[in-house]
Image: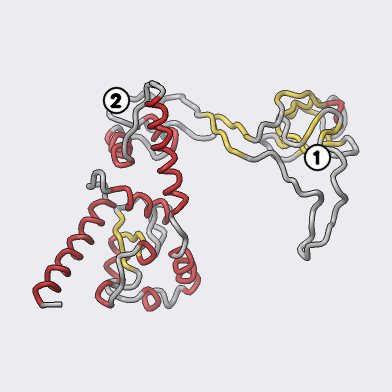
């Protein structure tokens, strides 16, 4: 390779590093997708000090000056002070006094980004399918969503991001007193016939029946206990027991040994939990 070719290559690599840092600061446009996936991988925080809600830069774990690559497996997000302190040191030298963090970073570097890639591909496939059926739907990049949210002074939250997607986002979004409904997939239970101990041996008997006294684990119930030490009203998911004494999980915590005669079914288990009002729409000062 000639001297001129090496000079051009080094110039392009320096420009690539500057572009990556600009993208991470939110200055990029359509090129922000790889940087966005890196931010997700490192949880939007500095890998070296866990700082968040600060400008982040790309850092090469094995420095470029020591023949490190630009591969994703050699990149982390770092705040400016940590990036400057590390300079061109190898991460093993930089974190020699923090062995636990060093081990965690080296392990996490190998974690693939295929989950984020799968979600991104699925999202655009759904978008194209909706358009095919004539459903009025709008899409946009993650950079545009963040721009809409930041310029409107909204905090970071998934449900607020959903309100800021696309160019049709209004200039004013009234989020006061809105409590989002949070839906979490919990599954329909386990196919395992019995519980195992840490050695792999059965520690319980095999399941005899899934439904007990008309209830099954995961059902949403209301229990009105009229007497005894557990007198009161409880609403939550039920865990059934063959003896007819159930556990209920309301917002306050698990309540054990509630007799089935006190329970009334509200909704059958569908593999999801529903919670509302846990996340504030806006900070109190807004």
As drawn, is 230 to the left or to the right of 27? right
Q: Position of residue 142 (x, y in %)?
A: 33, 41
Query: Which image quarter: residue 214?
Result: top right
Residue at (30, 32) in percent of width and height: 152
Q: Position of residue 140 (x, y in %)?
A: 32, 35
Residue furthest out toward the right: 243
Q: CA distance from mark 1 to mark 2?
A: 50 Å
Say which of marks 1 and 2 sits in front: 2
Residue at (74, 29) in percent of width and height: 234
Query: What secondary structure is found at the residue carrying circle 1?
Result: strand
- Residue 270: numbered disc: none
Q: Which residue corresponds to mark 2?
A: 168
Q: Nearer the viewer, residue 196 or 100?
A: 196
- Residue 256: numbered disc: 1
Q: Position of residue 102 (x, y in %)?
A: 45, 71
Q: How many marks?
A: 2
Query: Which image quarter: residue 125?
Result: top left
User: Badge 1: how crowded within 10 Å, few (<14), some, or many (20+)?
Assistant: some
Residue at (85, 38) in percent of width and height: 209
Q: Position of residue 88 (x, y in %)?
A: 27, 74
Q: Nearer the viewer, residue 48 or 159?
A: 159
- In the displayed structure, 236 sits above or below 47; it is above
């Amino acid at each position: 390779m000639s001297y001129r070719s090496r000079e051009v290559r080094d110039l392009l690599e320096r420009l690539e590093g500057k572009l990556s840092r600009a993208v991470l600061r939110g200055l990029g446009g359509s090129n922000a997708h790889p940087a966005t996936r890196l931010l997700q991988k490192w949880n939007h925080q500095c890998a070296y000090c866990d700082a968040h809600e600060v400008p982040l830069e790309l850092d090469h774990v094995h420095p470029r000056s020591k023949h490190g690559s630009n591969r994703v497996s050699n990149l982390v997000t770092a705040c400016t002070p940590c990036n400057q302190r590390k300079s061109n040191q190898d991460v093993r030298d930089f974190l020699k006094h923090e062995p636990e963090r060093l081990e965690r970073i080296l392990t996490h570097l190998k974690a693939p980004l295929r989950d984020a890639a799968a979600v991104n591909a699925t999202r655009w496939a759904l978008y194209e399918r909706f358009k095919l059926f004539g459903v009025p739907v709008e899409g946009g990049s993650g950079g545009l969503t963040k721009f809409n949210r930041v310029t409107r002074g909204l905090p970071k939250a998934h449900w607020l991001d959903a309100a800021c997607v696309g160019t049709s986002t209004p200039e004013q979004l009234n989020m006061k007193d809105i409590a989002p409904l949070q839906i979490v997939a919990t599954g329909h239970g386990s196919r395992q016939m019995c519980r195992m101990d840490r050695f792999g041996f059965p520690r319980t008997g095999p399941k005899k029946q899934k439904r007990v006294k008309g209830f099954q684990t995961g059902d949403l119930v209301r229990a009105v206990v009229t007497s005894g030490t557990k007198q009161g009203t409880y609403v939550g998911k039920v865990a059934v027991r063959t003896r007819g004494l159930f556990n209920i999980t309301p917002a306050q915590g698990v309540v054990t040994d509630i007799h089935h005669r006190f329970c009334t079914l509200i909704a059958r288990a569908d593999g999801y939990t529903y919670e509302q009002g846990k996340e504030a729409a806006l900070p109190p000062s807004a």
